[in-house]
Image (cartoon, rainbow, N blue to C red):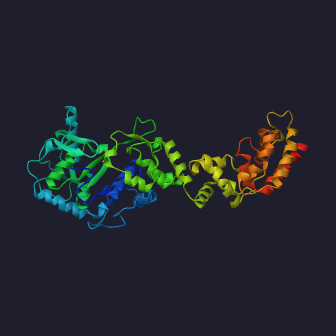
Amino acid sequence: MNMSNHSKPVVTRFAPSPTGFLHIGGVRTALFAYLWARQNGGSFILRIEDTDKNREVAGSIEHIMESLRWLGLEWTYGPDVAGPFGSCLQSDRLETYRSYAQKLIDAGLAYPDPYSTAEVTTFRERAQAEKRPFLFREHRPNEFATWDGTTPLRFKVPEVKRYEWEDAVRGKLSGGAEMLDDFILIKADGYPTYNFAHIIDDYEMGVTHVMRGEEFIASTPKYLSLYEALGIEHPVFVTLPPIMGPDGKKKLSKRDGAKDLLDYRTDGYLPEAMRNFLALIGWNPGGDEEIYPDAQLTAAFSLDRIQKSGGAFNEEKLKWMNAHYLKQTSTDFKQTYVANALPETVKQLPQYSTERLNKLVPTVLERIHNQVEITSAAEAGEYDWAFTVPNYKTELLQWKNDSTVTAAAPRLSTLKSLLQEAYFASPDDIKAAVWDYADAEGRGEVLWPLRTALTGRERSPDPFTCAYVLGQSETLTRIDAAITKLHQ
């Protein structure tokens, strides 16, 4: 079977359970499924596997949909868009599962579980004591009762044999008798198990490629046994590599940063950066290029470049990628982005204004990667100089090569004269007005007292940027204040 050119129109699916937040590993699965469908002009289905009502978390379905929409993954069919096959909610499809179950019953390939929980526990403990695997099929009844829906319905494995199959990523795989057992198809509560429902749904929905984690490899023989029993073709299996923690030694956990996808949105990550970043975890397009905007990513994606080994979740790379995409956004977007990250304490400073903030934005974005970093820097007071008169000791105005602080006074006076006549349309205009004087007098001797007079800080942006942000009037006022300090 050609893994890249399936004979049917490509249909992929992402099928999460509504049991909580959307883990990064699941999101990467959804992205790969979406990219493969999109590249082939196919369909991408969002199916909700809500058959475990005890674990279902209220609001999870809406949360999943919001998460995927933020990431830019639009589905062809989903909880809000029924397909020609019907609903994409498994809880709406119970009659479909029962009809397939009846086919197996009629063929003698399904039977009601005759044992109590206590009896099964006894069987299991006996197997453990004898140091052999517990297999339910070894306790299969000789005669099957009629299933009335009040007890679990089990699949009767028709033939215990070794299965071989082709995986689009792992190549030839196989599993034998130890993987085959009489598993439950429908539980006593009337809901199907995952092992049954996903096979029926994939078939009914025309799914051609199933993207999933390596933990499903061990279960594939029993899935193949059920495909055979139903007389249906299985889809292409695409086993994705695990997402590893930063050290690359173990799977990503909450402790390593495996948080809810929408938390990244809250932190100020852009969806295009997250898409690009996730695509490169376990998929290698070849070459050194790491930036793949949406169209290029879709065009480049291929199953044969998916890696077998796990890829590390490198948050520093995600930050770098986010900073790159931030630089590509519009001026209006950048200004809103920074403003939204500032705490109210900054916005309440006496000289705060949108005009001054917008001048500061390019400087803010030079060194940060997300909104969390903007908020942190603002809370540390890094931007206060732009919105309030600085309070500092006179000694701060002294350049390291000067013997006294008063040496700064005449230099500041000259700077005031030069800046009174300067254009303030950009930092470069301001630099042009004072650069010759700084070059002649000594750059440190001139620029240090100018910067500290404007900001009151040892570390800050260059003085030309500071003067531009403050504007001509406030720049001259702060220089005057510094001169007064020196004369006192």
- Which image quarter: residue 233? bottom left
What residue do we see at 20% from left, 45% from top?
Answer: 165
Q: Position of residue 464 (x, y in %)?
A: 73, 49
- Which image quarter: residue 107? bottom left
From where the camera sits, is residue 311 visible? yes
Q: Quadrant of the C terminus?
A: top right
Q: Nearer the viewer, residue 305 or 442?
A: 442
What residue do we see at 66% from left, 56% from top?
Answer: 344
Residue most toward the left? Answer: 142
Q: Nearer the viewer, residue 16 or 149?
A: 16
What residue do we see at 70% from left, 60% from top?
Answer: 355
Q: Position of residue 415 (x, y in %)?
A: 83, 48
In the rendered structure, the answer to whether residue 223 lies left or right of residue 394 reads left
Asked if residue 82 is positioned above or below residue 285 in the image, the reply reads: below
Q: Nearer the viewer, residue 133 or 28?
A: 28
Q: Position of residue 88 (x, y in %)?
A: 31, 63
Q: Nearer the viewer, residue 435 or 147?
A: 435
Total label count? 0
Q: Position of residue 430 (x, y in %)?
A: 75, 52
From where the camera sits, is residue 189 visible? no
- Which image quarter: residue 189? bottom left
